[in-house]
């Protein structure tokens, strides 16, 4: 009886382990989260154009990092290479990985989900505090902001 139970347990364990997704994940200093490549990535500006007519979209995007959370690297903002365009806040799926704090000015590829949302004053102030803004700059935030945000499952640092 014990032998049958053990064989059953081993069989179930093997079936469960074989049926799990083989999701590659890395934190090698160049890849963070799911391992991705730059193939078929659209530009930041192309994403923003698509978001003018969509509420959400799955995308792989390449662009320039402006800021990174200086507390622990738990978010970053991407910007257009064209001046005067708004930045996009990027967070990381399931809070599973963080970015290097000195990533500003570098080009990256992100893969995940973009959406249009309204960010509350409280959250905007929190982000400003994380970015090291002054007390006056934080207190000047008095209105919620409609913006494009992105939840990345993987990030590739290009340079």
Image: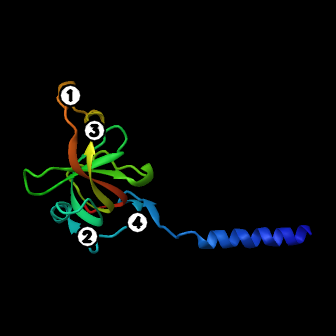
* Mark 1 or 4, nearer chain start: 4
Tell me what residue is drawn at x 63 percent, y 69 percent: 17
Q: Is residue 96 visible?
A: no
* CB within 8 Å, label 3 to label 4: no
Left of 103 or right of it: where is 17?
A: right
Give the crowd class for mark 1: few <14, some 14-19, many >=20 residues within 10 Å. few
Q: Secondary structure at mark 4?
A: loop
* Mark 3 or 2, nearer chain start: 2
Write down the residue under mark 3: 120
Task: Decide: is 9 above or below 94.
Answer: below
Tell me where residue 44 appears, x and y as whole percent.
19, 61
Write down the residue under mark 2: 41
Tell me where residue 65 appears, x and y as whole percent.
22, 52
Task: Decide: is 119 above or below 45.
Answer: above
Tell me what residue is drawn at x 23 percent, y 62 percent: 54
Q: Which color scheme is applied?
A: rainbow
Write down the residue under mark 1: 134
Q: Depth check: 74 or 114 in front? A: 114
* Mark 1 or 3, nearer chain start: 3
Q: Secondary structure at mark 3?
A: loop
* Mark 3 or 4, nearer chain start: 4
Tell me where residue 107 appears, x and y as whole percent.
22, 59
Q: CA distance from mark 2 to mark 4?
A: 14 Å
Q: Which mark is residue 35?
A: 4
Q: CA distance from mark 3 to mark 4?
A: 32 Å
């Amino acid at each position: 009886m014990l032998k049958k139970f053990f064989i059953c347990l081993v069989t179930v364990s093997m079936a469960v382990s074989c049926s799990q997704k083989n999701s590659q994940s890395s934190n090698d200093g160049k890849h963070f989260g799911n391992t991705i490549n730059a193939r078929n990535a659209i530009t930041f500006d192309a994403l923003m154009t698509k978001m003018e007519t969509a509420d959400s979209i799955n995308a792989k995007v390449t662009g320039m990092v402006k800021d990174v959370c200086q507390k622990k690297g738990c978010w970053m903002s991407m910007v257009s290479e064209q001046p005067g365009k708004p930045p996009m806040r990027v967070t990381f799926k399931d809070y599973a990985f963080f970015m290097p704090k000195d990533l500003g000015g570098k080009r990256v590829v992100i893969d995940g989900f973009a959406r249009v949302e309204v960010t509350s004053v409280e959250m905007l102030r929190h982000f400003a505090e994380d970015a090291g803004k002054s007390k006056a700059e934080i207190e000047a935030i008095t209105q919620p902001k409609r913006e494009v945000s992105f939840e990345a499952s993987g990030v590739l640092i290009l340079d």
